[in-house]
Amino acid sequence: MTTPADAELLELQLPGVRLQALAWGAPDAPLAVCLHGFPDTPYTWRHLGPRLAADGWRVVAPFTRGYYPSEIPDDRRYDVRALMQDAIDIHTVLGGDDRAVLIGHDWGAVTSNTLARTDKSPYSKIVSIAVPPLEVFDARRSPVQTAGLVGKQLTLSWYMLFHQLPRLPERLLPQLVELYWRRWSPGFDATEDLQHVADAMFRPENRRAAIGYYRALARTGPAMRARSTAETEILYIHGRDDGCMTAGWIDPTQEIPHRQIEVVDGGGHFVQLEQPDEVYRLIRDFLR
């Protein structure tokens, strides 16, 4: 594994798992934790991390549980409650204070969105990318519009059902990963990222872990729908050309308390790589 020249490699010993992480910025600066999704790695934060560090943040981007070189957790849990606890434990281990922020993409967004709906979040603000908060789906639409969006989304989300099959998804994972990047961010040259993904995901135990996030959906769903009186402020960013989650769900004019919604032109599912300048600008302004 290679570390970006402008980053350092950290080891985070959490109560339930030992994680490795990329980091930028001064250790005593306010904490910004960046959580990657599937099928990617902390290297997808290579544009945002140095810029936030230059703005005075301590940016820490872990390889989430099960992604090499982080550990396979002893409990083999990959549901969102375990992922949220990791995010909370990272804040504790790194001595985060009430200025700390959480930024999540894909599964990282599932984690951050769900944590924002609880009273357990130690983060003052949250940014989520590519998987919207549940409130976004509550926009007023006609039955015909809703049916059309559901139909389109089902054709995009076939992989979630495929990942429930035994053994076959692990066996085909290298081919699937290339397919997902090609379809989810059309036109983006993912050569560099695919090599990092191979390093992090293609060992047998890491393949099982990555697919395990989807096999834990039965436990993840109820946690996502649960809600307390807490409302952490969220900036939600979506690429207009996202081939994984259709942008038809996203209405930037929709007014939701504590939720800011932005759609970025020229970006797909990995919009933080495709339009790094715009994503940085939105996040910078939100965190100010």
Image (cartoon, rainbow, N blue to C red):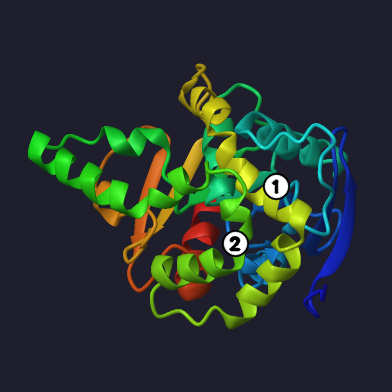
Q: Is residue 37 visible?
A: no
Residue marked by disc 1 = 209
Q: From the viewer's perspective, is 266 left or right of 282?
A: left
Residue 13, quarter of the rendered image:
top right
Pinpoint residue 152: horizontal percent, then vertical percent.
24, 51
Which residue: 23% across, 36% down?
A: 139
Pinpoint residue 105: horizontal percent, then vertical percent.
55, 53
Which residue: 81% across, 74% down?
A: 3
Q: From the viewer's perspective, is 52 left or right of 96?
A: left
Mark 1 falls on what kind of element? helix
Which residue: 54% across, 78% down?
A: 190
Where residue 221 is drawn, which disc sits there? none
Residue marked by disc 2 = 173
Residue 137, quarter of the rendered image:
top left
Asked if the residues shown at circle 2 and circle 1 are in contact, with their CB atoms under 8 angstroms apart, the answer is no
Q: Earlier in the sequence, mark 2 or mark 1?
A: 2
Which residue: 44% across, 73% down?
A: 182
Q: Is residue 265 visible?
A: yes
Q: From the viewer's perspective, is 93 left or right of 263?
A: right
Pinpoint residue 69: horizontal percent, then vertical percent.
83, 59
80 or 160, nearer to the observer: 160
Pinpoint residue 35: horizontal percent, then vertical percent.
65, 51
Crowd class of label 1 (few under 14; some 14 to 19; many from 20; radius 10 Å):
many
Mark pair 2, 1: CA separation: 12 Å
Tag 2: residue type? Leu
Question: In this picture, is 58 found above or below 181?
Answer: above
Which is in the foreground here, disc 2 or disc 1?
2
Tag 1: residue type? Ala
Mark 2 falls on what kind of element? helix
Residue 216, quarter of the rendered image:
top right
